[in-house]
Amino acid sequence: MYSEETEFKPMTAESVGELLSEAGAEVMVRSGRSENYSAPREFSFEVKGIFPNGMALHVVARQFNYRDPWETEGRVNDLVDVMLLRDGALTPLPKGYDYFQGVEEECGLDEEQLKAIIDCVRKVNVKLYLLQEMTGDL
């Protein structure tokens, strides 16, 4: 079903949680419609990871992509949205990073992009926020 040349690698709440956990984050996972039919139709799962530096990523798979027409098999999440939080509030990254520049959310990410964001955010020195606030860059 999954072809590396033509499709993204499917992600699950558990696989995203593992990525965050392996990067040193404290992880919380919540599944949506796949297990709880009272959840909104577009909600599949969300995973929140808080890193030791105080930065957090809130990963949301908003809906399944269907790989066959009758929804019997092939419900997958190959793209997710990621929100960045600092001290519990949405925030962009300081200038100089590849992601979250002037925005608090990155949308439509595949697993490789998610891994890159996780690596980036876990390494952020939060003192850069103070420095860039002082210089007027943030």
Image: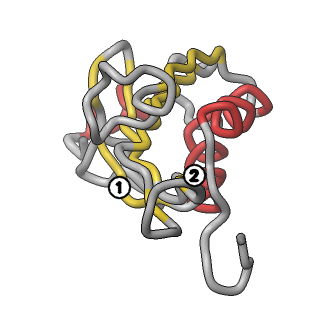
Q: Position of residue 8 (x, y in %)?
A: 61, 69
Q: Is residue 52 above or below residue 91?
A: above
**Is 134 displayed left or right of 9 in the figure?**
left
Residue at screen point 32% across, 54% down: 101
Report, in whole angstroms, how far the alpha carbon at label 2 lies from the one at label 1.
Answer: 10 Å
Earlier in the chain: of badge 2 and badge 1, it is 1
Q: Position of residue 48 (x, y in %)?
A: 51, 23
Q: Secondary structure at mark 1?
A: strand
Residue type pointed to by label 2: Leu
**Is 53 displayed left or right of 36 in the figure?**
right
Q: Is residue 71 above or below residue 136?
A: below
Q: Quadrant of the N terminus?
A: bottom right
Q: Quadrant of residue 96?
A: bottom left
Q: Position of residue 36 (x, y in %)?
A: 43, 20
Q: Which mark is residue 107?
A: 1
The residue beneath circle 2 is: 114
